[in-house]
Structure formats: C-alpha cells, structure tokens
Image (cartoon, helix red, strand yellow):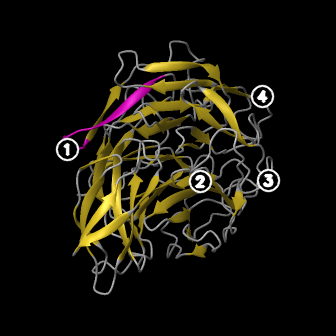
Amino acid sequence: MPWRHVAGWPSQLTAIHAVHLHNNRVMMWGYGDSNSDRDCKAWILNLVTGEFFQVDCSVNNIFCAGHAMLADGRVLIAGGTDSRQGENGEGFGTRYATLLVPDASLPGAHWEEGQPMGSTYPDDARWYPTNTSLPDGRQLVVSGTTQLVPPPFPPRPPGTRSYNKKVQVFNSDDAQPWFTALIEQQLPLYPAMFVIPSGLVFYAGRGTQDAPFKKTLALRLTDFTWHDVTLDFDNGAIGEHNSVCSFSPGKILRCGGNVAEGNPNASAKAAVIDLSAWEIGNPAAWANIADMNFPRRDHNLVMLPGMKVLAIGGQETSDYTEPVMQPEVFDLNDLDGDWVPLDAPPDLSYPPRMYHSTHILLPSGEIQCSGGQQNETTTYPSGDIYTPPYIAGDELDRPIITNAPNQVQYSGSFQVVATVASGRTLVEMCLISYACQTHGFDQNQRYIPLAFTQSGLGTYDVGAPPNANHAPPGYYMLFVTDNTGSYSQAAKVHLSV
C-alpha cells in the first residue's frame, strides 16, 4: 500500500514547518508559545531509527519564519511571530535570527541565537519572509510583515499589512553578518524566489493583493537593483496560496492558488517559464501547461527524481470544506503532457493535508506528509508516508547507488557507481536540495539534472553543475533513475567551489 502512518508522532506536533537536515533528521514545529516572541516547541525526527526528540527553541518564536540551508549545512531562520501582540501575534514579526545547527548529539541538532536582523522593533521584524541561498554562500532575506493593522484575518483591505521592504543579505563569515541594501522592494508574503543561471534572483510571484501586483521581478545582486521580468499573470496561477517550484536551473513551474483576489475558489491552472538563458531586458513569458485534475490552494509541490513534480494536499476552497485527497503528478520532460492522478489515502485515519501542511522528499524517495488544519483552530498533529508509484512495490528492482563522492566541485566531473535491474538502463541523474518547507513553498528548493555517460560496467562519469548560479553551494541528495521511472535512494553530496 502506498500510504502508511508514522509511528510515535508527538501529540503536540503540528508540522507547519519542516526542515530536512543533511544528517538524516527532520526538524519540525508549529505554532509558537503564546505571549512570547522567544519560545517555540519543536521536535526532531531521526529518519534512521524513527525516534522523536523534543528540542524546543528558546531564542526565537520561529512560527511563520523564513528558512533555508547555508553552504555548511546549518539552517538560517529569519524572523518569526511575536505572540505578545495582536491576536496571538498574527502578522507581528520578530527581528531575531536563529541558526539550526546539525550535530553529533542523540537528537542530532541544536539551536543557536544569531545576530538580529536589526535593532529596531517593529521596523526590522519579519513575519512570513523568504530566505534564498545565494551563489556565493550568503543568504538573501526579503518580505514579511512587521505588524498587521486590524482586522487580523481575511478579508484584509489593501494597506492593512505593514511590509518589511528591506532587502537583506546574511553572511555567516562576517562579524557583522547582516547587510541591508539601500534599495527597498515590497513583495507579497512568502514570495517564491529562485537563483537563475544569470546570477539574478527571480521573484516568481505568489500574490496579487499588494504591490508589485501582477509583476514578476529579478534582483541583480551586484548593485541590488530590481528589474521587470513579466508584467502580468495572464497565464498560470495568479492568486495567493499557489505553489511554485524549480525543475531545472532557470525553469519554474507554478500552479493552483486562488482563482482571483477575493474569490474563495482554487484554480487548477499551471504554467512554466524558462529563464535559463534570460538576461535583463530580454522578453519573457509564462506558458500554460495542462490544468491539474483538481483545483488546489495551500498545496505543496515536491520534485521527484526523473523530473516529475508531485502536487499533493491542498483544498478547493478557502473554508476547509473541500480537501483534495488525491495527489497527482506531471512529467516535466513533456510539457505537452497531462497531470496523472495517483492513489488517495485508503481511509479516514489519514487526515486531509490543507493549509499549514508540509510535504517533503526523504532520502528513501518517499514523501513525508504532515501538519495541516481542519479549520482556523483545529490542527492535525500527525504524519504519514506516501510512496510514489515509481518505487512502490519495486524495492528489489530499484537502482542502487553503491558509490558516490561526498564532495563535488563545480565544472568538473565525478564518478558514480550504480547497479540497475536486469534489462534496465539509467536515464537520469539529479541533485535535489534538502527541503525547508512551510506554507506551500520550499524556500530551499532546487532540482539540478546532471549529464552523464557510462564509462564501464555500472560506472558513470557525471558532469558537475558548471557554477554556483546553477546550484548554490551546500548539501544535496543525489538520485539516479532508470528507464522504467524507478529511482534509487539518495546519496548525500556536498557541492562546493
């Protein structure tokens, strides 16, 4: 059966945030402590033993923070929720920065307090920001609200959000790690940001209620200037609550979300854009692909080996009454193809994964499904495992990586040894980043196809990414896929200069 429950799930853990560490751990947390800007309960799962450990964060209320992995494997967590303010802190950010540090302890990680993003509250606070790992090892932090003028819940009249428009970069090597650019830019909450091969950072759009409305933009890091990429959302998912992913350097997919602002119904639309050779001033446009089988908002996109994308979870309206239980998959090797529906959970013991749910790819190739809400106040403190059809029932015949380097450098080549079942051949190798997911978007998400040739029996010469614009430095999972679509378990690889 492709679905099973995760045993021993803590009864207090609703995994609204899920951060996959390179040492076979997943750190998860949900709502922070009430009346606090510092405390948040958190649990870490050992993927090898199945054990959970409670490792609370006492230096920042990290609910609704941004997070992405640094090149050394630590995770920078920016902002969070000040639950002392408003209605349980809704819309009120913190100015704190926190580091999640993998270690050799039994839990496998600990929290460290970082230097705050600024000294002034609320001007330097962020709630719902996005972190993006950069080619030089630094990390970009944008967006989020400093505070939210009432009413705290939708419908929100325009102008009620007080945005943090600062563009900041974190450099862990500096004694004063935060740099604030002179230019400001308003972006929606949790904007979808991706480094593209030109070295620019692309904002792919996630909302239209506030500026920059229907534009998509690119940030040039050499002078911190913003440049228009597309001027409207005529194609693809235009509303908030959509999901976005990269399926190759510079190639972006977005789908679902609200049909339109103020409309509670979800969209089934999907579109792609190719910025793999884009430069400032060049024309660019989103191109529609087939609609999903189910309208979705508050869903997640998970890239699978073989360049397939899984749309999973979500709901058809904003009122939690129409969950989408059936996942579906799209083969991004064929943009003229259709979305294929997959098996839904077998019974009601598997809760719907709607708003505030997380779905992440594990080294086993399976998907951890967790979190979500039944309504504004009732959550789902549980976790499930979904096994995609490409590996379900194929355990004995899956490709196996028997040898791969721990360290890979740009522009060179490296050797992988892998075995395949009789009559099968390898057709794809890829690097997939470790997930740092919340609110329908993985801020650490990257999918890097790799060119390779067979040089001997079970031996393959593999081309590394040409430079850090194609794949920022850090830890990745290496997968190989055979001609039936079956893929291996992951080997851990660290990519560096």
- Which residue lies under the disc numbered 3? 234
Give the mark toward the camera: 2 or 1: 2
The crowd level at tag 1 (other Cα within 10 Å; few <14, some 14-19, many 20+) is few
Distance, label 3 to label 4, CA atoms, is 24 Å
Q: Amino acid at mark 4?
A: Gly
Q: Amino acid at mark 3?
A: Asp
In front: 410, or 130?
410
The answer to whether any part of residue 36 appears in the image is no
Distance, label 3 to label 2, CA atoms, is 16 Å
Give the mark toward the camera: 3 or 1: 3
Distance, label 3 to label 1, CA atoms, is 51 Å
- x then y, percent, for residue 48: 24, 58
Distance, label 1 to label 4, CA atoms, is 47 Å
Which disc, if any, is residue 106?
1
Q: Secondary structure at mark 2?
A: strand
Q: Secondary structure at mark 1?
A: loop
In front: 390, or 158?
390
Q: Secondary structure at mark 4?
A: loop
